[in-house]
Image (cartoon, rainbow, N blue to C red):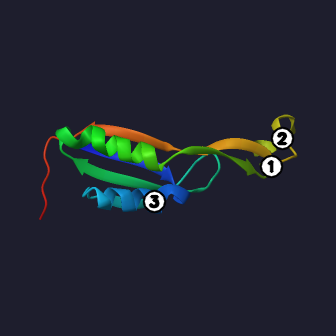
């Protein structure tokens, strides 16, 4: 058995949730925040049998595509104005960061 932890952008959360339900995968959703853009994310925890791992990963990949987004300038950290960019920049966002962990035991009470 495996535990999939998939961190996805909030914009992709509902689409992924519906796809997981459609394919009869159970998941727990947790609200999270990304460190770089300080934007909302959703972390999905999905318990899965080894035989269905590739199917679940395929669903995550299909529903969480990377795209470019223009972000406002970030203020300089620690007063370092040398690294400050005063105009909006385009950065890649979305997609999914996925961890697959082995599960030694699973109990449901």
Task: Count residues near mark 3 (Cα–Cα under 10 Å), then give few for <14, some for 14-19, many for 20+.
Answer: some
What distance separates the C-alpha of mark 2 from that of mark 1?
8 Å
Quarter of the N terminus within the rendering: top left
Question: Which one is in front, 95 or 30?
Answer: 95
**On the image, which quarter does residue 90 sit in?**
top right
| Percent x, y of residue 44 | 38, 54
Give the label, 3 or 1, closer to the camera: 3
Q: Nearer the observer, disc 2 or disc 1?
A: 1
Q: Is residue 88 left or right of residue 100?
A: right
Residue 88 location, x and y as percent?
Answer: 82, 48
- Residue 84's tag is 2
- Classify residue 4 as left or right of residue 51: right
* Tag 2 near tag 1, CB within 8 Å: yes
Q: Position of residue 19 (x, y in %)?
A: 37, 57
Q: CA distance from mark 3 to mark 1?
A: 29 Å
Question: Tag 1, which secondary structure?
Answer: loop
Q: How would you rate the neighbour count of disc 2 (Cα within 10 Å): few for under 14, some for 14-19, many for 20 or more?
A: few
In the rendered structure, find residue 15 and report the number of the disc placed on it: 3
Q: Nearer the viewer, residue 33 or 94?
A: 94
């Amino acid at each position: 058995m495996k535990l999939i932890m998939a961190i996805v952008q909030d914009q992709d959360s509902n689409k992924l949730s519906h796809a997981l339900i459609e394919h009869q995968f159970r998941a727990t959703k947790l609200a999270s925040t990304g460190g770089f853009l300080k934007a909302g994310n959703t972390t999905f925890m999905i318990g899965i049998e080894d035989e269905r791992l590739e199917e679940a990963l395929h669903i995550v990949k299909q529903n969480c595509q990377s795209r470019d987004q223009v972000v406002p300038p970030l203020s300089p950290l620690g007063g370092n104005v040398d690294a400050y960019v005063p105009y909006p920049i385009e950065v890649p966002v979305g997609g999914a960061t996925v961890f697959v962990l082995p599960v030694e035991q699973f109990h449901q009470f």
